[in-house]
Image (cartoon, helix red, strand yellow):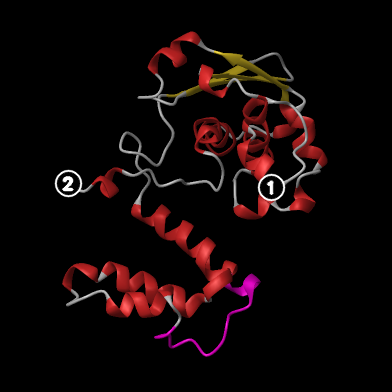
Amino acid sequence: SFAVGHTDIKPYPSCRQTHAPIDLALQAIRGDGIDRSDIDAIDLHTYAYNDQPWYIGIKAPTSGLEAMLSIPYCTAIALARGRVALQDFEHDVLADAGVLTLMNKFRVHIDSELTSKWPAKRGARLVLTLGDGRTKQYAAEDPRGGDICPISEDAVREKFALLAFPVLGAATSRQIENAIQQCDGAPDIGRLLRLLRGEDSERSGRDHVTAGIAQATA
């Protein structure tokens, strides 16, 4: 089989090292309904490769790139907002008081067991201590988006829509999506390439960004 068939598809627009912690944070928020205001402490266990200040430093990021590399920031965004999207790395979001408050509750631990499994596995453990003294523990062997934990086709479509609609508009984005789905039966990929170059679109004008995102998530 082609190697491209085994390439990870990142569900979140951040460094791949942040993804397993994000998965666990979303499990806590979406699955268990934990409210960020109930969290007193956050203990993150990760592998030794991440023992670098740009990955685990507890400080407010000063740029979108710093934020995308920061495991505490990305995890705090997931806990605070129940999602991690491209707009969470815009400059005016980086100083969000709620996110920074959660970051300051982080303690990062380099875990020998997780380190022994890296790089074949890129797992994480997350322990949340709640205000009433209870702890909630979450673990992942590998982040979503790879061969071990693939994301669904619907999730791939949703990611494409969120990224493409604001740039290309809803109509062109849908045409590209349809052309990709029909590739197997197409005589060639000429139409897809023309669409990607903006040469074969039925679109009469670029959709407004907000309207595009609204349709993408409808």
Q: Dot 2 corresponds to which residue?
A: 1
Q: Is residue 205 magenta?
A: yes
Q: Quadrant of residue 179?
A: bottom left
Give the left or right position of residue 174, taking residue 71 as reference.
left
Residue that label 1 marks: 64
Residue type at the position of mark 1: Gly
Residue 152 visible? The answer is yes
Magenta stretch, main secondary structure class:
loop
Picture quarter containing residue 141? top left
Q: Position of residue 4 (x, y in %)?
A: 29, 49
Residue 217 visible in rendering? no
Residue 70 vs residue 216: left or right? Answer: right
Q: Which residues are magenta?
A: 199-212
Number of callouts in the render? 2
Callout 2: SS: loop
Determine the CA span between mark 2 and mark 1.
36 Å
Check disc 2: other Cα within 10 Å, few if <14, some if 14-19, many if 20+.
few
Mark 1: secondary structure: helix
Figure check: 176 above or below 139: below
From this view, report whether residue 192 is shown above or below residue 14: below
Please report whichever mark, 2 or 1, sits nearer to the chain's N-terminal start.
2
Give the residue displayed 58% in from the left and 82% down from the top.
206
